[in-house]
Amino acid sequence: MNFSAFWVEKEEDGFKRSIIQREIDDLPPGEVLIDVHYSSLNYKDALSATGNPGVTRNFPHTPGIDAAGEVVASQAADIAVGDQVIVIGFDLGMNTPGGFAQRVRVPAGWVVKMPQGLTPHTAMLLGTAGFTAAACIDKLESAGMRQDGGPVLVTGATGGVGSVAVSLLAHLGYEVAAVTGKAAQHNWLRQLGATHIMSRDEANADAKKPLLAERWGGVVDTVGGTMLFNAVKSLRYGCSLAACGLVGGADIPATVLPFLLRNVNLLGVDSVELPLVEKSRIWQRLATQWRIDLSPLEETLTLETLSAAIDRILAGDMVGRGVVKLQP
Ligand SMILES: NC(=O)c1ccc[n+]([C@@H]2O[C@H](COP(=O)([O-])OP(=O)(O)OC[C@H]3O[C@@H](n4cnc5c(N)ncnc54)[C@H](OP(=O)(O)O)[C@@H]3O)[C@@H](O)[C@H]2O)c1
């Protein structure tokens, strides 16, 4: 059977994107063949589509680190034909053909059964970005973050991780402050639940000072660089920052002072290799107590509109979540 797939080829003068027809036999071996109903666009997919070797080394390639849909063949005892499932992370869309295609074949160890309360569509409206926002909040709460502990800062707030983090934190009763470079989206962020909006310049100011005024009861940081460490320097005593992204840079201009003098914590968050049991636990939370209406974040994409959206996410211009509809 043929299926449609987004296709990135390496050429002498760069990387060419197209849509092609592929055969099931073209897919790598794996226990579970999935009819992909929805995928989603993440920043990492754009890196894959433009040949970033830290993400994808082998071309031609189909990106897409997220996929949700229905099992059409399974050699795994606990996964049956007809099951609805989610796959995010591991090697999907990196060097394994990814979710920007109507079919994927993956190892059973990558597959999470769809929790009751989510559908392939709502799971991919969350996708890796939403899952990561939830993983950050989960880790911050485990480290002691509480609703009465002060406002929580979200950086890169209009992006995929950021916009889900703002929405989820507001839903959970936190006071939310948002950093954005998009002046036109302040009202949108307020509608999602942010009560205080900062510019990137404000969030990057006073970078040379060893400590800043204590403000935040927690931080979800998607940006890295100066913005990350300024936020660490502004944490209230004993509070934590969850670091998950690097759109602003991978280096951190850091000293040990906030850790020594304010007892604060810098927490790392990874959604890719997180063990399946942990992934399932967080998806379960997102399907129950943390289930929220994310429709204000949605932009529907198709294989045909994906290439332009990849350029927009690379330029930092995407707002909310791009959900890729794979079936007619
Ligand atoms: N650790 C993990 O497992 C994991 C999982 C998912 C994502 N990530 C990482 O998290 C980051 C965000 O991913 P995403 O999918 O949410 O991307 P995204 O949708 O492109 O959002 C990133 C947002 O960051 C802001 N931004 C962009 N360039 C910036 C710059 N130079 N300086 C400051 N802010 C900038 C923009 O928001 P504003 O215009 O509102 O400022 C942008 O919308 C990426 O680095 C991604 O690789 C990591």
Image (tube, rainbow, N blue to C red):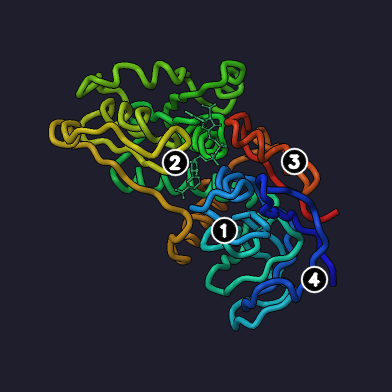
Which of pointers 2 and 1 lies earlier in the amino acid sequence?
1
User: Are discs 2 and 4 less than 8 Å apart at CB?
Assistant: no
The amino acid type of the residue labelled 3 equals Thr
Judge from the rendering whether residue 1 lies leftward or rightward of residue 42; answer left or right.
right
Q: Nearer the viewer, mark 2 or mark 3?
A: 2
Q: Residue 23: give its label.
A: 4
Which of pointers 2 and 3 lies earlier in the amino acid sequence?
2
Judge from the rendering whether residue 283 lies leftward or rightward of residue 114; answer left or right.
left
- Residue underneath mark 2: 245
Q: Is residue 1 above or below residue 75?
A: above
Q: Is residue 253 above or below residue 64?
A: above
Ligand 1: does it lie within 8 Å of the C-beta at label 3?
no
Q: Nearer the viewer, mark 4 or mark 3?
A: 4
Mark 1, other Cα within 10 Å: few <14 / some 14–19 / many ≥20: many
Q: Residue 94: give its label.
A: 1
- SS under mark 4: strand
Residue toward you, 224 or 170? 224
Which of pointers 4 and 3 lies earlier in the amino acid sequence?
4
- SS under mark 3: strand
Residue 57 figure quarter: bottom right
Residue at 32% x, 39% y is 145
User: Are discs 2 and 1 less than 8 Å apart at CB?
Assistant: no
The amino acid type of the residue labelled 1 equals Met
Q: Position of residue 76 (x, y in %)?
A: 60, 81
Marks 4 and 3, how far apart at CA: 26 Å
Residue furthest out toward the front: 12
